[in-house]
Amino acid sequence: MKYFSEEAFQKVNVFGTGHLNEAFAQYFIGDSFLNPLTNPKETAVFLANVTFEPGCRNHWHIHHATKGGGQILICTAGEGWYQEENKPPVSLCAGTVITIPPGIKHWHGAKKDSWFSHIAVEVPGKNTSNEWCESVTDEEYDKLEEK
């Protein structure tokens, strides 16, 4: 379900918006918010609720690992997009789960007309790192259509 109103969205964003994601703002177009759900000092699996304002998306990026690794997105509220390089975009809504193996160039974010949240799961692995690439251009983003 789409939520253009922040007030209406906050009523269904059960894992909370958290704080403005200033540490990674350079890798996003628009504002995103981060609410850590686990403490990496207490568990091997880091979970965070990431919230995107309408039109916000992260840059293309790749999760690297020599063993294990990758990312899982568990969509919890609003509507968004996920896209792997050279593949069609995938429409996201609450209940959608996306498994991203290591080495796959991709991006994700909100639709133009909806707030969006997902829980980001960093899959444990060996020698994990994240490579940030170019931004998703307005031209690329504006071409997205409902499927």
Image (tube, grey):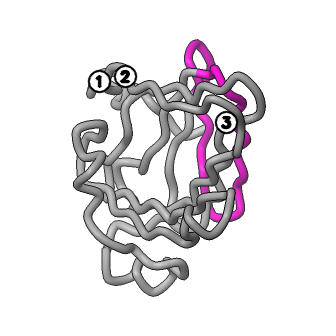
Q: Earlier in the sequence, mark 2 or mark 3?
A: 3
Dividing the picture into quadrants, the one containing residue 101 is top right
According to the picture, the residue beneath numbered tag 3 turns out to be: 70
Question: Compared with residue 114, is residue 145 higher up or lower down, i.e. above or below?
Answer: above
According to the picture, the residue beneath numbered tag 1 turns out to be: 137
Dividing the picture into quadrants, the one containing residue 1 is bottom right
Q: Is residue 8 magenta?
A: no
Q: Residue at x 51, y 81 (%)?
A: 12
Q: Residue at x 53, y 25 (%)?
A: 62
Q: Helix, strand, or loop for circle 2?
A: helix
Check disc 2 and give the amino acid type: Glu
Check disc 1 and give the amino acid type: Thr
Check disc 3 and give the amino acid type: Gly
Residue 57 located left or right of residue 68: left
Frontmost of labels 3 and 1 is 3
User: Which residue is most to the front?
Assistant: 41
Q: Is residue 97 magenta?
A: yes
In magenta, the rendered stretch is 84-104
Residue 109 located left or right of residue 142: right
Residue 23 x, y percent position in the rendering: 26, 51
User: Which residue is most to the right?
Assistant: 68
Residue 29 located left or right of residue 45: left
